Image: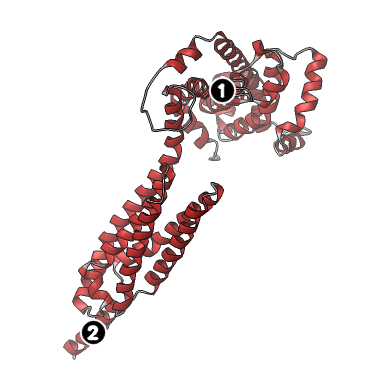
Amino acid sequence: MIGKGSSISMGKDGDLARLWYIPAEIESLRNLFPFVLLINLVSFWLFILREDFDSAFSASMQFLVTATLFFMLKKLDRGKRFIRDGVIGISGLVLLLSVLQFMSGPKITIDIWMMLWSSIPALWVILSVSKPVVTLWASGKQTVHSAELGLSRNRTIKRFHGTILRHIALLHAVAFVVLPILWIIDVAVSPGNSLGGGFFEIITMEHFSNILSSDSFWIWTRNSVIVSIGTTMLGLALAIPAGYAFSRFRFRGRDFAMFSFLLVQMFPGVIILVPYFLVMKALGLLNSSLGLILAYSVTALPLCVWMLKGFFDTVPKELEEAALVDGCSQNQVFWRIILPLSIPAVAVTALFSFLAAWNEFLLALTFNTSEEMYTLPVGLASLISSTGQAWGDFAAASLLVSLPVVILFIAFQRFLIEGLSAGGVKG
C-alpha cells in the first residue's frame, strides 16, 4: 500500500511539474518585450518630432510587428510548436525591418540606439526559442524528469537574466547622465562653435583659453562667490536659531508661522519678482551684491528652517535636560551640545543655500543691469545672443562653473548622506 501511494504521489507531482514548467527564457522575454514596445513608441514619437515621416512609417510598422511578436510569446505554451516556429519567423522579420530602417539614410547616435533596441531583442528571441530545452517544451514532448530538471534550472537562469536586465537598466540611467556631459565636453574642446559632428575628432583648448583670459569671466566669478557665500552665511544665521526654536519651544503663532513657511513654497518665484524689484529700488540695492544676498536668503529661508527643524527633532531632549541639570545655561546647551551634533544638517543646509545662490538666474538678471555686477549664470547667458552664439566658449565656461559644485559635493558627501538620512528618523 505504501509503495502504491508513493507512486500515485509521484505521478501527481510529475503532472504538476509538467503543468507548471515554463522555460525561464520564455518568461524573461515576456517581461522584456513591454519595454521594447515602449522604446518603439518613443522612437516613433522622435521621428514625428523630427518630421522624418519615412522613418516614422518604418517605426510604426516595426512597432506593429514587435507587438505581434509579443502577443505570440504570450500565447506560446507547451505543445504549440507551430507558434514557436512563428515566433522565430516574426523575429527574423523584425531584424530585417530594423536593418532596412538603419540603411535608409544617415543616422545619429539615438537612431543607432533605437535600432539596437529592435534588433537585439529579436535576435535574443531567435536564440532563446531555438534552444533544445524550449523546443522540447514547445513540442509537448516534455517528460516528468526533464520538467523537474527544468524547474530547478529556471532558478539559476532567472537570476542570470534578472542580473542582465538590471545592468541594462542601470546602463541606460548612466547614459542619460553621462552623454550630455560628454557632449558639452566635446563642444568645449572642439574648434569653432559647432554643436554637431563626431565625438573628440579634433581637440583644442582655445575655448578654455578664451574664457580664462577674459576679465569679464573673473568679475562674474567674484560676484557669484560673494553672493553665494554671503547668502549661505546670512541664511544659516537666520535658519539655525529659527529651526531650533520651532523644534524645541511652544509659543503663540508657532503653528501659523510653520504653515506660512510651507505656504510660500507653493508659489513660483516669479510672483515675487516685481515686489522684490520695487523694494530693492526703494532701498537703493539694485546692481549690488547685498541686494541679491538679501533676496536669496529670504527666498531660501523657509526650506532651510524646515530642514534644520527636522534634524533638531531627532536630537533627544534628554541630552539638553542632562546638561541643564549639570549647570549649563540654555545658550551653552545650544552652542556646546546641540550645534556640534547638528553639523551634518548644517552642512547640508549650507550646501543647498550655496547652490541655490550659485545657480540662480532670474533675480540676478532682473536686479543687475550693469555687466560689472553680473553673476555667472547671467554672464554665461550673455554669451548666447541673437547676433552671435559662442557655443564653444559657453560650453567651456559651463564646465568651469560646474567645478566648484562638484568639489563641494565631494567634500560634503559624508555630511550630505548623514544629514539627509538623519532628518528622516524620529528619536
Tell me which colouring the rendered structure shows.
Answer: secondary structure
**Closest to the observer, 185 or 279:** 185
Q: Secondary structure at mark 2?
A: helix
Residue 194 at what x, y percent from top left? 48, 28
The amino acid type found where label 1 is placed reads Leu
Q: Relative to residue 229, is residue 299 depicted above or below?
A: below
Q: Residue at 67% x, 23% y: name it.
A: 296
Relative side of 306 to 72, left or right? right
Residue indicated by mark 2: 11
Relative side of 245 to 71, left or right? right
Q: Relative to residue 94, is residue 357 depicted above or below?
A: above
Residue 312 at what x, y percent from top left? 59, 31
**Closest to the observer, 95 or 35:** 95
- Quadrant of the image for the C terminus? top right
**Closest to the observer, 148 or 74:** 74
Q: Residue at 37% x, 22% y: name it.
A: 203
Q: Quadrant of residue 23?
A: bottom left
Q: Which mark is residue 339?
A: 1
Q: Quadrant of residue 328?
A: top right
The residues tagged by marks 2 and 1 sit, at their Cα atoms, a distance apart of 72 Å
Q: Secondary structure at mark 1?
A: helix
Is residue 245 shown to the viewer in this render?
no
Q: Residue furthest bottom?
A: 1
